[in-house]
Image (tube, rainbow, N blue to C red):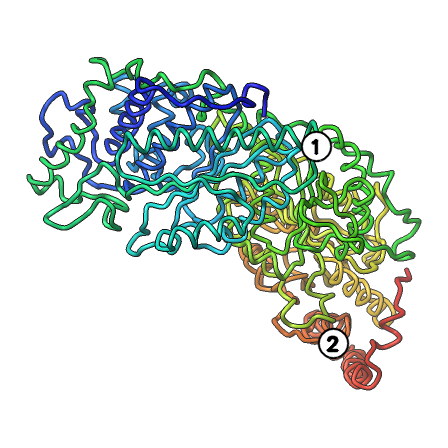
Amino acid sequence: MPEAAQHHGTAPTDEELRALDAHWRAANYLAAGQIYLMSNPLLTEPLKPEHIKPRLLGHWGTSPGLNLVHTHLNRVIKERGIDALCVWGPGHGGPSVLANSWLEGSYSETYPDVTRDARGMERLFRQFSFPGGVPSHVAPEVPGSIHEGGELGYSLAHAYGAAFDHPNLLVACVIGDGEAETGPLAASWHSNKFLDPVHDGAVLPILHLNGYKIANPTVLSRLPEPELDELLRGYGHEPITVAGDDPVQVHRALAQAFDEALDRIALLQRTAREEDVTQRPHWPMIVLRTPKGWTGPAEVDGVPVENTWRAHQVPLAGVRENPQHLRQLEAWLRSYRPEELFDTDGRPCAEVLACVPDGARRLGATPYANGGLLVRELPIASLDDFAVPVDKPGATLHEPTRVLGGLLEQIMKDTTARRDFRLVGPDETASNRLDAVFGASGKAWQAEVLPVDEHLDRHGRVMEILSEHLCQGWLEGYLLTGRHGLFSCYEAFVHIVDSMVNQHIKWLKTSRELNWRAPVASLNYLLTSHVWRQDHNGFSHQDPGFVDHVLNKSPQVVRVYLPPDANTLLSVADHALRSRDYVNVIVAGKQPCFDWLSMDQARVHCARGAGIWEWAGTENGSEPDVVLACAGDVPTQEVLAAAQLLRRHLPQLAVRVVNVVDMTRLLPQEEHPHGMTDFEYNGLFTADKPVIFAYHGYPWLVHRLAYRRHGHGNLHVRGYRESGTTTTPFDMVVRNDLDRYRLVMDVIDRVPGLAVRAAGVRQQMVDVRARHHAWIREHGTDLPEVADWSWTS
């Protein structure tokens, strides 16, 4: 943290406490107003039903607590001159974050039509959860946000991701006690074992215990205080507890807690940075216990509301129809004394704004929450320095991800000083053959190190933890605050973050529609240890369906690549790492794989996304009788082996081989920016010839992508059919009918007139498959002609 933060905070005076309370009351008034009002924002006349929205939506219960935190963060940011970002875990408390950004002026600067006066206040109120307006959650539309509030559990991981490699940044993170019950949040407490006090910023968790979820009490709020304290200390934190329902007492205690926490953070950072103290810090955190729906209606219709689950959303639901509810709402709103908080024109008064920081230090204006303003081009060396030489197709083998590891190592080296690239993965960097990166950076680690350990580094930028949730959350926070990265994962287990990538894709889609949000670096997945080479681990490790999941999402955002060899992987990775505002999914093998294309050929092929491999087919300038298509490294090898068998046994057959790298090319152009026109598609696959498509994943995906094409009736797709076990590599493709012999049989079955003429060839293919089944059960290895196969023109 900057020098200005390295001082002991002074307790606020009574006058300063009154100003803090004024700001908090103003924020509470604005939050409640957004839920209920569409006119009469300053209550210049008695409330009438026509002033009330026809549909009452939003979440009141968490808003007073979020407003309290925002108010006190303003104070310490301004007093200490620090750069700060806040991640709002209870992001459904959108009214409070909107209210505070309007109060500080950042909202009106972002949206000039929502002015900071009575007219703008009315617009602020009306637009909330209203058609054509803004969502009820802390969404991309909200200045100062990097965290969508629609799904709980990810706030603390996002906060740590934001803090990594931002040494002068304080990231406050409000964690709702309902959110604290989720698995991702429970794992996120361990992030402090990876936070480097020298090169990273600080995270200040604020566990807000208001006691209730939608309809139930929360677990942590019901723990005895000593037990909760022990739990949080066991996670490696020093908790500072603030509890109460008297505003004056809570303001005073929370101000003291923030000062104590920030003084402790400054001390830990100073001793690590200046005195080379290497002991793992025990970082402070704040436990804030205040009533749910604080300052709202205590009772409604004789039933308790404040400090119960009934305050979670809209405490007074029948305001338009029930005159008593309308009077109660007016009394509630007037209890904040808006006439003291806003002048006659609706502008916040000086006392309300006394705690608000200036300029970019306002939480709604910080560039750290608009990371595209901070992102720099990633230095990527020439791919020719890492490419494997390919004089002719299929003459050599390399492990594609190991080749990529060399490129990533160089990126790590070239970002050593600027520290804006990280590689994350669940304990699989070496397993996925990317361990070359350890030549440039070790693995981040602040806990104990034993002599047997390898590559652990207090200042490392490779992040490994056996939680896909944390890997995803860390990387999202890192990218959204202006940096670059890559997530490497076993293909089958990336599904653990299905829901998280949903949210990130939605965030990117919305952000792309906001002209004030600058593009951020793409979220890049490298999925390896894939389905076809999990023969040793078995059925539980075999699932290629993440691609299906992603391709259901916004076409403006998602991209899927299946490079067939090492050089195409380099080309695809180079493109993905340079891109902005996408989610790129790259599926590539780590096992030895034939090299098909030179680097120059790979660049051209990947730029096309799909193309004819003339050297593999037998068209010779004539119209093809059949198209053998493939996507993925193993399907590509099987298609080429099938093409070779057809060349040998049916030399008169005109075979076209098409390889697809970019799966979205199969979509119509009007449905995806990378999609092909019908003219392009028919030129590649033909409009009326049989197409045998060997696909890496579930075959129905290809049908779904191409169902509108003219030749769809001729399209026959082979892929993974949930037939897996512990077996040999080739038996995996045989079990799923993706093998070369089955593909030859498919050609014979589907080319008109060939079934009779090539019946003997088909029988040979059936016989080889039978011999395969017997061989692997006797020898435990694949047939020699399969294990020793190589491409020959």
Total number of numbered labels? 2
Residue 19, position in %: x, y? 31, 20
Residue lying at 18% horizontally and 40% vertically, measured from the top left: 297
Residue 399, position in %: x, y? 82, 55
Say above or below: 469 vs 417.
Answer: below
What residue sits right under mark 1 in the picture? 419
Location of the N terminus by quadrant is: top right
Residue 389, position in %: x, y? 91, 47
Label placed on residue 727: 2
Q: Secondary structure at mark 2?
A: loop
Q: What kind of residue is marked 2?
A: Thr
User: Mark 1, residues whose alpha carbon is within 10 Å: few (<14), some, or many (≥20)?
Assistant: some
User: Disc 2 vs disc 1: Cβ atoms closer than 8 Å?
Assistant: no
Residue lying at 88% horizontally and 47% vertically, measured from the top left: 388
Residue lying at 25% horizontally and 46% vertically, measured from the top left: 307
* Quarter holding residue 749: bottom right
Left or right of 637? Residue 165 is left
